[in-house]
Image (cartoon, rainbow, N blue to C red):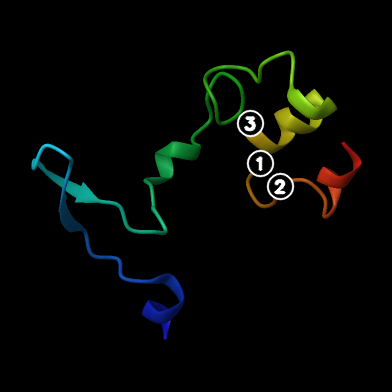
Amino acid sequence: LLQTIMGNQESKQDEDENGNEQQKSQYPVIGNKAIMSKKKNGSTEEPVQEKLKWNCDRKIAVRICCHNRHFAENSGYWRST
């Protein structure tokens, strides 16, 4: 059942346009826990850019991108921007 939900986790070989073998990505991509370790700006080294598109609130963007451990923005937030 888990394989049905998450898909095949095995890496596969594929060829690029030049015929070179490449690893084909499988989802979900599961990273090492160090990805979320404390950094200069929460879980990121660089701060969120100052000017955001669609009138997005920078404070919310910082919370989501740099200090988010569980969820993103509130349901429907994107409709209000």
What is the secondary structure assignment of the residue under circle 1? loop
| Mark in front: 1 vs 2 | 2
| Residue highlighted by disc 2 | 72
**Residue with the mark numbered 1:** 68
Q: Are marks 2 and 3 in contact (CB under 8 Å)?
A: no
Q: Describe the element under mark 3 as helix, strand or loop.
A: helix
> Taking the image as drawn, is residue 58 in sight?
yes
> Mark 3 Cα within 10 Å, few/some/many (few <14, many 20+)?
many
Q: Position of residue 16 (x, y in %)?
A: 17, 42
The numbered disc on residue 66 is 3
In which image quadrant can residue 54 be found? top right
Q: Residues within 10 Å of mark 2 (few under 14, many from 20)?
A: some
Which residue reaches farthest right? 80
Q: Element type at marker 2?
A: loop
Disc 2 residue type? Ala
**What crowding class fits label 1: few (fewer than 14 Cα within 10 Å), some (14-19), or many (20 or more)?**
some
User: Gap in Å between the C-alphas at discs 3 and 1?
Assistant: 6 Å
For image coordinates 64% across by 34% down, the residue present is 65
- 49 with respect to 7 (left or right): right
Q: Can you say whether 18 is above or below 5 in the image?
A: above
**Left or right placement of residue 52 versus residue 81 in this view:** left
What residue sits 42% from the left and 45% below the top?
33
Give the number of the mark in front: 2 or 3.
Answer: 2
Instruction: Give the farthest residue toward the front.
Output: 17
Q: Amino acid at mark 1?
A: Asn
Q: Quadrant of residue 10?
A: bottom left
Image coords of residue 2 (percent x, y)? 41, 80
